[in-house]
């Protein structure tokens, strides 16, 4: 019998039982892709991550990331959580202040910054690939049916548009907090109008009305194609969300074309999550897109692979 250990983390939270759950595996040999997919399906968390030695000796680790249904080329909370665990457990050496790492993921090299203060890991940030803006979605009636909202509850002053930093999400602006809280996601409408297009099958909704004063946006994400009915925190979607907000003038810069945004997510699921988004832009476009947050190690477990 082959026993495989894993750690269980809550990511994008400082509080146990908040944030997004993550299983982190550090196998002593490379597992077949089929086995990793079965493990992710067995645990049925939004994502599980498998950490391997990096191919490049100058990099820290190589990550393979799986939802219950598919492998992802990049994802936010597995990257943040994996880095937190490696730093917190001393598996990768860290010093006080900022520690710059490189993870190898399906999209290529992913820069990670681990912040350490008074011997504690206080924050992990990841830099995401430059967001690419896709087509706008014009079938408003399909969107209202998908979310069980009226057209008046959509913010039609903003586009419904796909943006991607490796995984495409369709961003749908909602007019109010009460409207986004009342979303009833229609899987049948998703299957009919959205599931067949890779640029529209992952649905991200947001409103600038928030529950917490320090937040910029209130977010909800639905991804049946990933095996996730609703996600408590979506790092891979948060960088493109920040770019969308900047591109459409929803947020104002702090200084030097730098934008600091906080997304609250998962509140409807009872798993409050808080994702920091940092955007830097100049006249030539987006220069740097980063997301970050905290994590909590909540437990550990074993799987028996026969």
Image (spheres, rainbow, N blue to C red):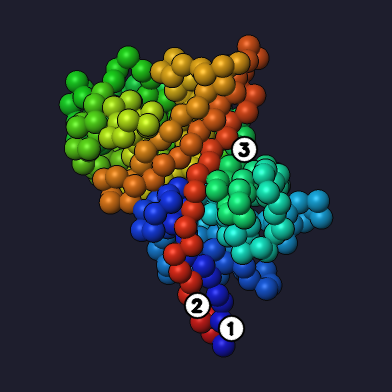
Residue shown at 63% from the left, 11% from the top: 283
Dot 1 or dot 2, earlier in sequence: 1
Q: Report the Cα–Cα distance between label 2 and label 3.
A: 32 Å
Query: As drawn, which residue projects farthest toward the right?
Result: 57
Q: Which residue in the protein does label 3 denote?
A: 127
Could you say which quadrant of the image residue 112 lies in?
A: top right
- Sequence-wise, the earlier of marks 2 and 3 is 3
Q: Residues within 10 Å of mark 1 (few under 14, many from 20)?
A: few
Spatial distance from mark 1 to mark 3, Cα to Cα?
Answer: 36 Å
- Looking at the rendered structure, which numbered label has been put on residue 302? 2
Mark 1 or mark 3: name the one nearer the start of the chain: 1
- Residue 162's spot in the image, x, y percent? 45, 29
Per the image, the residue denoted by label 1 is 2
Q: Which image quadrant is residue 142 in? A: top left
- 190 and 2: which is toward the camera: 2
**Residue 169: x %, y % from top left:** 44, 36
Q: Quadrant of the N terminus?
A: bottom right
Q: Secondary structure at mark 2?
A: strand
At horizontal 46% and vertical 24% (from top left) the residue drawn is 244
Q: Is residue 266 above or below residue 207?
A: below
Please determine whether, in this image, residue 118 is positioned above or below residue 179.
below
Question: Could one spot residue 83 in this view of the protein?
Answer: no
Separation (CA) of disc 1 from disc 2: 10 Å
Assess disc 3: are there few (<14), some (14-19) or many (≥20) residues with their C-alpha within 10 Å of its C-alpha: many
């Amino acid at each position: 019998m082959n026993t495989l250990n894993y750690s269980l983390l809550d990511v994008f939270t400082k509080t146990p039982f908040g944030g997004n759950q993550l299983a982190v595996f550090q196998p002593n040999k490379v597992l077949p892709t089929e086995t990793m997919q079965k493990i992710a399906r067995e645990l049925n968390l939004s994502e599980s991550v498998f950490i391997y030695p990096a191919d490049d000796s100058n990099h820290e680790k190589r990550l393979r990331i799986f939802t219950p249904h598919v492998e992802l080329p990049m994802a936010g909370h597995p990257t943040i959580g994996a880095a937190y665990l490696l730093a917190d457990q001393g598996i990768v050496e860290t010093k006080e202040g900022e520690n710059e790492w490189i993870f190898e993921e399906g999209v290529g090299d992913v820069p990670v910054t681990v912040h350490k203060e008074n011997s504690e890991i206080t924050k992990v940030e990841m830099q995401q690939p430059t967001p690419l803006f896709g087509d706008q979605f014009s079938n408003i009636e399909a969107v209202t049916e998908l979310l069980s909202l009226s057209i008046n509850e959509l913010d039609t002053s903003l586009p419904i548009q796909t943006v991607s930093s490796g995984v495409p999400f369709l961003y749908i602006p909602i007019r109010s907090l009460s409207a986004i809280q009342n979303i009833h996601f229609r899987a049948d409408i998703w299957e009919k109008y959205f599931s067949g297009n890779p640029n529209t099958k992952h649905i991200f909704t947001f409103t600038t009305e928030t529950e917490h004063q320090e937040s910029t946006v209130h977010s909800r994400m639905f991804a049946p194609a990933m095996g996730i009915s609703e996600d408590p925190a979506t790092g891979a979607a948060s960088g493109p969300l920040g770019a969308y907000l900047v591109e459409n003038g929803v947020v104002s810069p702090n200084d030097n074309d730098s934008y600091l945004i906080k997304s609250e997510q998962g509140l409807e699921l009872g798993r409050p999550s808080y994702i920091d988004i940092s955007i830097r832009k100049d006249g030539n476009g987006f220069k740097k897109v980063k997301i970050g947050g905290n994590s909590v190690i909540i437990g550990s477990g074993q799987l028996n692979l026969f």
